[in-house]
Image (tube, rainbow, N blue to C red):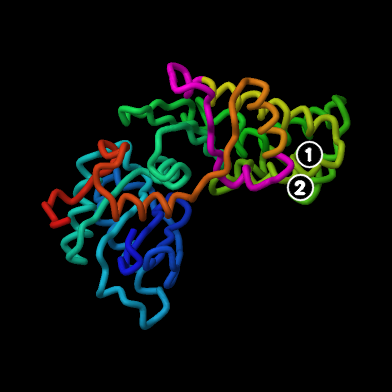
């Protein structure tokens, strides 16, 4: 990206919509608010477009929005509808009068982490998914199949395992300090099922228990440590699946996501990956960096997964 390029980048997820205005590597301004269900739903492009404009309107005043050279948006639901993703890109391009690129949040995260290079990225947040783009730009994916059928080893998974351990301890199973941690949620473990059923998003609620599991594991709780060790082993298997068929030599993976922000967890995961012959590397950027890359460069390795407005803009 040229230092004079002013680009608008966005991460329009299911829980949050974040926008940034950037000039080269300089952050000019940022804003965020609520998310939306996804671009793939009925009227999804219009909902995403309106949400973006609402969020942009909350940017600090006086920013050079009128001098934009490109727009890049990582948007939930892109994988489910290429047509609606292109529709959103066209709406953005027509509104701002500059090239627009729309891509999935996972593709954007991979782009940001490896700056467009081939390789593997592992995203560990409420869910868990591993992506590998090979030398031909073909996507290979492992897990990320949601809380019912996948996302093993994720924040939701660890939190759920922790809450289950609390109930097992209540039934006479191994004692764990997680029981005291759950006391901040309910008066008695017997109330946990009802508490979870009342949550607007039970999966996110379980994921919020994951930091308590990590804290207990780091403090020496055997039950919590077993959960965390299992999560690391599962995630290592997920990365191995994504790496299957990679003939480039020793696999390397960049790890992103809220759970990976824990130094304790990252250290254990790094050891688990190393035992499988996989090197864990620091990500070079995040999803917003990936969206900026898509907005400012064409012909990327991942180009087939980036939905552009279809206009032949001059280089």
Q: x and y percent of residue 18 in the render?
A: 43, 60
Q: Which region is colored magenta?
A: 241-265
Q: Which residue is mark 1?
A: 189
Front position in the image: 68 or 180: 68
Pointer 2 and pointer 1: residues touching (CB < 8 Å)?
yes
For residue 250: magenta? yes
Q: Residue at x 42, y 51 (%)?
A: 13
Dot 1 falls on a residue whose secondary structure is helix
Q: Quadrant of residue 65?
A: bottom left
Dot 2 falls on a residue whose secondary structure is loop
Q: Which residue is mark 2?
A: 186
Q: Quadrant of the C terminus?
A: bottom left
Q: Is residue 100 visible?
A: yes
For residue 96: magenta? no
Front position in the image: 294 or 234: 294
267 with respect to 296 (left or right): right
């Amino acid at each position: 990206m040229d230092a004079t390029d002013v680009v608008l980048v966005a991460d329009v997820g299911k829980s949050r919509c974040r926008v940034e205005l950037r000039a080269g590597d300089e952050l000019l301004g940022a804003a965020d608010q609520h998310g939306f269900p996804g671009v793939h739903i009925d009227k999804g492009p219009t909902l995403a477009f309106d949400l973006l404009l609402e969020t942009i309107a909350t940017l600090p005043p006086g920013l050079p929005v009128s001098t934009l050279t490109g727009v890049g948006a990582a948007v939930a639901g892109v994988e489910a509808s290429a047509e609606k993703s292109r529709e959103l890109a066209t709406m953005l391009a027509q509104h701002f009068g500059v090239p627009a690129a729309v891509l999935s949040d996972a593709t954007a995260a991979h782009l940001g982490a490896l700056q467009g290079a081939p390789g593997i990225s592992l995203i560990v947040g409420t869910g868990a998914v591993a992506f590998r783009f090979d030398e031909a730009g073909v996507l290979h994916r492992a897990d990320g199949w949601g809380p019912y059928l996948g996302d093993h080893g994720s924040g939701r998974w660890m939190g759920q395992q922790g809450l289950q351990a609390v109930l097992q301890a209540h039934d006479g199973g191994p004692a764990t300090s997680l029981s005291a941690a759950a006391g901040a949620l309910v008066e008695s473990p017997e109330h946990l099922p009802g508490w979870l059923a009342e949550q607007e998003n039970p999966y996110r609620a379980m994921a919020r228990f994951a930091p308590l599991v990590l804290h207990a594991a780091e403090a020496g709780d055997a039950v919590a440590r077993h959960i965390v060790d299992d999560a690391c082993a599962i995630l290592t298997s997920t990365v191995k699946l994504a790496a299957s068929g990679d003939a480039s030599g020793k696999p390397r993976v960049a790890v992103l996501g809220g759970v990976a922000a824990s130094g304790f967890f990252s250290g254990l995961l790094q050891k688990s990956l190393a035992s499988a012959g996989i090197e864990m590397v620091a990500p070079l950027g995040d999803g917003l960096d990936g969206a900026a890359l898509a907005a400012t460069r064409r012909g990327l390795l991942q180009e087939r997964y980036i939905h552009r407005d279809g206009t032949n803009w001059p280089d």
